[in-house]
């Protein structure tokens, strides 16, 4: 009961402070502008493609993308042939051959991104006991909305960018890190098992964009948000159509109502 009342108070005050929502950190999370923010915002296709490149070349070695199929990449601006070629870069188990040896096939558009590890145990063994989270829904896992300003939100992308850009080479004075942990301003408790994954020019962007740490962080955050809500643009377009339809219908009903009740208000009977 008390927890519910506290939550209501936070909502009424205009939303949860993102710095506090991310743990006991004393650091403030930076708010960025995102092209897909707001009721009419749409994804930046170039940023999505760059983000996919960062995921593939940097993040996919540890993080899975279990809920995204290759065929969905057409939404990023790729052609069907390009998606087929991209899927073909991956291999999938295809049973056993006549000699009992496991055989493989090239990926197809209907396949989903393969996981980097065969099991959770293998993933933990390779990451100092920590389990790298799946990227499919992570882009929206820390999204907070204000009831008064629903389109002025603290997005999960800001949290992702914060984590990727606020590593310290050394912990601040007085902070003792656990074995195998790294200091990060944004992460809960400021200690994270993942080493800094991004460095200047970690990737060479196909479109020639300068690959700064912040640029790569923003791009992969945009891609992760799309992965979490790939139908966002369609939803917004449908919502706009519904609003227009309801507005027209309301106006029509107003004049119909006015016409129907005109005679009654004038003291006349219906014909």
Image (cartoon, rainbow, N blue to C red):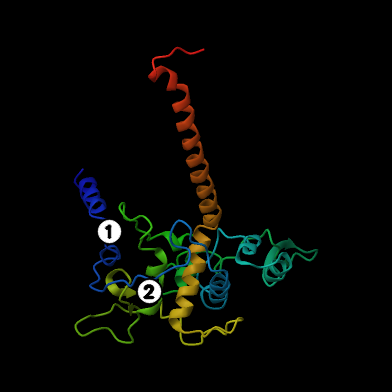
Residue extending farthest to the right is 98
- Tell me the crowding category of disc 2: few under 14, some 14 to 19, or many 20 or more residues within 10 angstroms, Cα based: many
> Secondary structure beneath disc 2?
helix
- Identity of the residue drawn at 24% across and 84% down: 172
- Identity of the residue drawn at 56% across and 72% down: 52
Q: Looking at the image, which is closer to me, 244 or 159?
A: 244
Q: Tell me: 89 left or right of 33.
A: right
Seen in the picture, residue 220 relative to 112 is either above or below; the reply is below
Seen in the picture, residue 163 relative to 95 is either above or below; the reply is below
Where residue 215 sits: x, y (%)?
A: 47, 79
Residue 193 visible in this rendered orientation of the protein: no
Q: Looking at the image, which is closer to me, 185 or 51?
A: 51
Which residue bears the numbered disc 2? 163
Q: Looking at the image, which is closer to me, 235 or 74?
A: 235
Q: Tell me: 206 left or right of 126.
A: right
- Identity of the residue drawn at 45% across and 32% down: 254
Q: Report how many numbered discs are placed on residues in the image.
A: 2
Report which quarter residue 89 is drawn in.
Answer: bottom right
Q: Are marks 2 and 1 in contact (CB under 8 Å)?
A: no
Q: Tell me: 60 left or right of 22.
A: right
Seen in the picture, residue 40 relative to 206 is either above or below; the reply is above
As drawn, the label of residue 256 is none
As drawn, the label of residue 16 is 1
């Amino acid at each position: 009961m008390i927890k519910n009342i506290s939550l209501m108070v936070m909502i009424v005050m205009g939303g949860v402070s993102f710095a506090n929502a991310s743990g006991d950190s004393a650091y403030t999370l930076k708010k960025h502008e995102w092209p897909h923010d707001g009721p009419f915002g749409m994804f930046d296709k170039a940023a999505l493609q760059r983000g996919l490149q960062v995921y593939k070349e940097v993040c996919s070695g540890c993080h899975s993308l279990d809920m995204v199929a290759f065929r969905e990449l057409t939404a990023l601006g790729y052609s069907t042939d390009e998606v087929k070629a991209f899927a073909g870069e991956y291999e999938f188990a295809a049973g056993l051959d006549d000699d009992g040896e496991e055989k493989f096939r090239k990926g197809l558009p209907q396949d989903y991104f393969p996981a980097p590890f065969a099991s959770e145990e293998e993933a933990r063994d390779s990451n100092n006991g920590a389990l790298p989270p799946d990227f499919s829904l992570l882009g929206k896992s820390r999204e907070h909305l204000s009831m008064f300003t629903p389109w002025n939100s603290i997005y999960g992308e800001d949290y992702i960018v914060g984590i990727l850009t606020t590593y310290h080479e050394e912990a601040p004075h007085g902070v003792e890190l656990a074995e195998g942990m790294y200091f990060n301003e944004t992460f809960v408790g400021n200690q994270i098992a993942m080493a800094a994954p991004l460095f200047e020019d970690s990737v060479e962007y196909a479109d020639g964009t300068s690959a700064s740490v912040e640029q790569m962080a923003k791009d992969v955050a945009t891609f992760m948000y799309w992965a979490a809500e790939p139908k966002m643009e369609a939803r917004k377009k449908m919502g706009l159509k519904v609003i227009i339809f309801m507005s027209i219908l309301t106006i029509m009903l107003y004049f119909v109502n006015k016409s129907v009740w005109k005679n009654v208000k004038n003291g006349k009977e219906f014909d």
